[in-house]
Amino acid sequence: MTTHATARPAAKAAAKPATMAQALQRAMRDAMAEDPTVHVLGEDVGTLGGVFRVTDGLAKEFGEDRCTDTPLAEAGILGTAVGMAMYGLRPVVEMQFDAFAYPAFEQLISHVSRMRNRTRGAMPMPIVVRVPYGGGIGGVEHHSDSSEAYYMATPGLHVVTPATVEDAYGLLRAAIASDDPVVFLEPKRLYWSKSDWSPEAPAAVEPIGKAVVRRRGTSATLITYGPSLPVCMEAAEAAQAEGWDLEVVDLRSLVPFDDETVAASVKRTGRAVVVHESAGFGGPGGEIAARVTERCFHHLEAPVLRVAGFDIPYPPPMLERHHLPGVDRVLDAVARLQWEAGS
Amino acid sequence: MDSLQQRSSTVQEPPGAALAYRPTPPPAWQPRTDPAPLLPDAEPLRVLGTDAVADADPELLRRLYAELVRGRRYNAQATALTKQGRLAVYPSTTGQEACEVAAALALEERDWLFPSYRDTLAAVARGLDPVQALTLLRGDWHTGYDPHEHRIAPLCTPLATQLPHAVGLAHAARLKGDDVVALAMVGDGGTSEGDFHEALNFAAVWQAPVVFFVQNNGFAISVPLAKQTAAPSLAHKAVGYGMPGRLVDGNDAVAVHQVLTEAVTRARRGGGPTLVEAVTYRIDAHTNADDATRYRGDGEVETWRAHDPILLLERELTERGLLDEDGRREAAEAAETMAAALRERMNADPVLDPMDLFAHVYAERTAQLREQAEQLRAELDAESEAG
């Protein structure tokens, strides 16, 4: 990314912990204040402030022309955003829930992702598509899908997902500043996660495409992102009792993919497990495992394993705990990394 | 069985007949708009053959004629290029030239045109280089022009998906205080798509300065209009969105120009969107790859040939003394010159740089694309070394 916003000068930090939802809201607010071409649109984003309150206060502060309640129509929301981008605006659209984004897929895949390419760079699409995604909040059907594999499979899109409050702010600022379309996946079960991050002194904004090592370790690497990061951090702590010192890599960006950080980690540890919520078959883990294998084959002590959601439609909420990869399933995979030839 | 009979006898009673109170209407209900002014006329508007032509600007009439003749020749030339293998495919607008030309001429320079894949002629009539308009169909690049230069969006292949783009652009222009209008073109088949509905709904709710222009040419590839919609006309669909619907004879160039100009002017003045249905006919097949004899008879085509847009205008202008033999020859010669130039330029092989494959995927290449570009570079080097 060539263009990305710079961090505000650090003010006296307020000690009150902030949530991810607040950090996202602050990111949009700061972007809108700095750049009059940034417009937020979607169903319920105005008066209500979004069903998760992520756009709370934006319509009041910037007016309904800048933060617009649209008719209930996802293809229309994204389709009109394309036209707005053609005229020089930077739309940030909200899809409300993961599975509600599917009607907008044609616009995303046929137009948003390839308008730059189609026009030889004359018509970039600086659009952010915010998609609250993933399970774990007891949502009914169509409210808990993890659709990242569909987006990853579409050239021309960036696919980004924060796992921390700090990253929620930094990555969304970078996404809005990007001249390319960004599918911004918000792990909805982390909306209320808190940190000491201060809205008064937002963290530095980093370019999209950099993974980060969240925990240093020596015996294996857990490669993860979004809602599965806290699971992996917890698993890493628990694994210590078994004598495993796990490294945890948070991808942050699925496209572009940070091969360098991931491969460097796996070369150090010699073992890797990819952890994500979405279905394993045809899921992001397969791609990641292949990339790791290609780069680290001679360093690997065991096959790259995947811990993913089952290959089933997202289950009803009373069963979702059996589907979502939890700490135990991650630890089981780690145990299987004691690979021996012929086993 | 008993319970079924009971139920049906219950249904036959007038609802609420036994109740002591009279139901009241739902409290929040009120009509949002009076539907009557939104309804299209019963017959498509015709201007040719009526006194209204006398009011038309003679220069505009001559310009329309010249553009129709040029457009017909363009269609013929492009179709010929498919037979020579110079175009992968060409969806002809022979018979529909009046719609294409009027769409282009109804717009001001600052306005935007949103064409479908069939509307190359509208783009050319708006001033786009004919070769640049054909790159999508030739296959050397998807869009051969900078859309901002003539304010023509890329020719859109998926059906109706460009309509919400037109709405968004017009909305954005209005937010910026520019009096720009977007004219979005779609066929009769495209009106069945969800994006058609969403675009019209957004446009009406936002009162966006957009004109939706449906060329109803009778068929979506092979499917006739009767299997496409049960609406009284496609223009009637406007009423459901709260915008006016207009119905026009799509082969009457003056009428189409008049209706579109009125709609554009209305949008520019803040009057909101309009849906215009032009009733026309596709004389050629869907594309050169289609066999139209499988789904329609010669008789039908012949009746439409008698209602040809060029014949209609030519007859009118000749009778009114606005066109003579010299004028006809002049228009034909200009069309021939255009066709010869197009033929010659299209017969030259385009020079392509395979490295362009990676040039415009993202603003900045990802590490993955840099690797793949290096791979292709190496393959190309090896190819050229091998001679």
Image (tube, coloured by chain):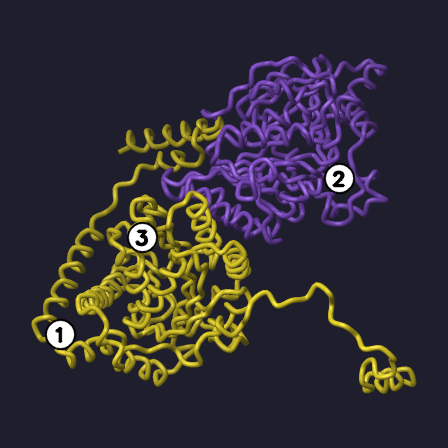
Chain colours: A purple, B yellow
Q: Name the residue at 49% across, 44% down.
A: A112
- Chain of residue at mark 3: B
Return the x and y of residue B18 as percentages of the image width and height. 87, 83
Return the x and y of residue A343 as percentages of the image width and height. 77, 26
Q: Name the residue at 9% across, 75% down.
A: B325
Please give the residue where the numbered disc 3 appears in the rendered image: B138
Same-subunit check for callouts 1 and 2: no
Q: Nearer the viewer, residue B382 or B78?
A: B78
Badge 1 marks a residue whose secondary structure is: loop
What amino acid is at disc 2?
A: Gly
What amino acid is at disc 1?
A: Leu
Question: Which class describes the residues within 10 Å of circle 2: few (<14), some (14-19), or many (20+)?
Answer: many
Please give the residue where the numbered disc 2 appears in the rendered image: A135
> Quadrant location of residue B300?
bottom left
> Quadrant location of residue A260?
top right
Same-subunit check for callouts 3 and 1: yes
Residue B31 vertical position relative to residue B159 in the rendered view, above or below: below
Residue B60 vertical position relative to residue B293 in the rendered view, above or below: above
- Chain of residue at mark 1: B
Front of the two marks 1 and 2: 1
Return the x and y of residue A80 as percentages of the image width and height. 50, 49
Badge 3 marks a residue whose secondary structure is: helix
Q: Residue furthest left?
A: B326
